[in-house]
Each structure stands twice: as C-alpha cells, then as structure tokens.
Image: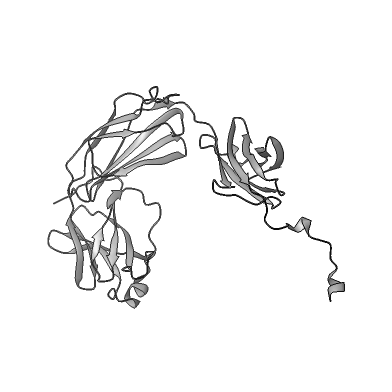
Amino acid sequence: MEHRREGRDAPVEYLLIRGRLDRAGEFTPRRCSSTTFVHRWPDATGAEEVARIGAGHGEVLVETVGEGGEVLQREVAEVRSEEVCEPGDARTFRVLAYIGLHPRTRSVRVRREERVLWEMTVPDAPRLAVRLEAPPRRGKGKRDGRPAQLELELSEPADESLAFLTVVHQWGERGYRTVHLGPVERRLTIPVEALPGGRECRLLVTYSNGLRSAAAATDPFELEPVGPSVTILRPGPDDDPPAGVPVVLEGFVEDFEHPGRAREVDALLWTVDGKEVGSGPVTSVDGLEAGRHEVALTYRGQDEARAAVTLRVGESKEPTADQWDDWDPVELG
C-alpha cells in the first residue's frame, strides 16, 4: 500500500507506537496513533533493565517495512518499567516510539533481535468530520442545561480493538482539558456543567483508526464562565481532633478561565465560625474548644468563591501541653 504526501512541503506524518511488554517478551499495542508534530522524542533507554529481569535481550526496535520487505526506517523504543502494585504481579514495561511514515511504507513492526513481536499493515489515512447538534449551555437547574451532542462521520477503523476517540475542550488560547477518551462511537454526549467557559470554546476531536489519526473541531460556541473554585484539603470530613490540639488548615483555589489570578495566595482567607484565623494555602489554628465548628476558605479575587467544612472537635481525654504543670529540667536532673 502506497502513501503519498499531498505536496512537497506537506508535513511529515509520524506514527506513535506504544504498548505493553510483559516478562515473557510479548508485546500488546495500546492507543497507537499518528501526528505531524512530536512534542517530545522518547528517551531510547531501558534495554538493560528489561534484560536483567528476564524479558529478553537487546533493544526494542520499531521499524517501517516496504513492499519488498526492506526496512525503510528503524527507531529504538523507550522502555520503562511499570509500577507493580501487589506482590507477585507480573512485571510489565511501557513501550513508546515515534517513527516517520515513509511514502513506500507497507507495514510497521516491533522487533527484538530476530523476533518480530507485533506487525500491522499501515492503513489509509482516516477521515473525520464533526458536527455539533446545538451549542451547549450551562444551566442553573438540572433541566436548564444542555450537554454538547457530537455527531461524527468517520472512516472504518483498520482495527476495531485498537481504534479510539479523544475529545479535548478548548476554552482559551492555552486552555485545554481532555473530556473523553474511549472506543469509537458515532455519537457522543459531553457534559459541560463543570467545564471552563469563554466566548470562543471548541471541542477538538481526534480519531485513531488503530494506527493513523485524523482531527476535526466543532464550530466555536460560547459557554458561561464557571468562575474560581475553592477546595479544602485539611481538615478532612473524617477528622475529629481533640480539643486544645492545633489544627492544620490546607486548601487551594483554581481559576481555569483566569489562571494568573489563582496565584494571588493573599486573597485566600481562612475563618473558623466566621472569625478570621489566617490566610494563604496553608495555615493553622490553635486548639479549638470541643463542639462543632465551621471551617471556611474564601477566595477574594476579582470573583469570589468559598468552601466550608464542619469540624467536630471532641473532648480531650488527656491534658494537652498547655495544661501541663511547669517543670524545671535542671531540678529533675
């Protein structure tokens, strides 16, 4: 199968080959795709670690192969050990490589020494078109909002088990968030209630047919801003400190629509039962009396946001340090 570029100045298409290598040396592809821009070239190391634990010897190579079986290009893959969660779990490795798609490429393969671990015929470039049924909107009630309904027209996957879709929400020049990653569907529903807003929002869709990718975007739409949000990390919902013990207060603010404003840490104000006790992302309050207390964190930037938790302080069973009798270590010596 021959692949021709549209023009002499057309960008080079790179295949992104990734997958999992197990201890027996078996390779399983995972979310392979293609791109014309490589953000970071893989670090082609890791063969020594793979060999040391018995998953074979030699580097993991990715090759493009021509019609006559000749190797057109060869790249050394990056191999990284995956974290093992439980004792006795099989050791696995992540494999990652980019390789240029030569016009005469027939197939791409993963190889170690003379053993071909995986090979796939390079399909034609996929086709993708995206249509937004109606501009989504954020509602104040459950019935007021409208999610983004996407209709997709796309070519058939080269491999149904490997094909996938990615949807990214864009709300500004540098505002991007992945909102969907999954198998191929012709219709998608994307909730927008928690997504950052703006006047020129878009949904960017990427379709991989199992090896090569196509991208398309919806028409711009306006989505009302969600504004900043505040999160309290400590105290947590299950914390029940005893009376008289200092309590650590920790939280943060996020403002995806205005990321620079969220750095104004002085605009974070802590209160306990309505009384100011500190500012910034981390502070503490001296021992509280037994009972229920409202701990609140308020962000007072251009827009205001607030979060609060109820802290239950129990009676202390032992005297705290401020209740100890005075003592002189010299006299005790």
**Residue 257, visible in the rendered structure:** yes
Colour mode? Answer: one colour
Q: Residue at x 37, y 73 (%)?
A: 49
Q: Which sits in the foreground, 294 or 43?
A: 294
Q: Which residue is drawn at the image coordinates 16% and 42% (left, top)? A: 156
Horizontal side of residue 132 vs 243, given as left or right: left
Q: Residue at x 47, y 36 (%)?
A: 173
User: Can I make out residue 13 in this image?
Assistant: no
Using the rendered view, name the quadrant where residue 50 is placed. bottom left
Q: Residue 138 occupies which quadrant of the picture?
A: top left
- Image coordinates of residue 145 in percent, x first then y, are 39, 25
Give the left or right position of residue 267, taking residue 202 as reference.
right
Q: Which residue lies most toward the top here?
A: 144
The one nearer the camera, 141 or 90, is 141
Up-down relation of residue 67 to residue 199 (above or below): below
Q: Position of residue 164 (x, y in %)?
A: 26, 46
**Quarter of the picture holding the C terminus:** bottom right
Residue 238 in the image, given as x and y percentages of width and height: 54, 48
Query: Which of the pair 205/90 is nearer the observer?
Result: 90
Image-quadrant location for residue 20: bottom left
Numbered-mark total: 0
x, y percentage for residue 157? 18, 45
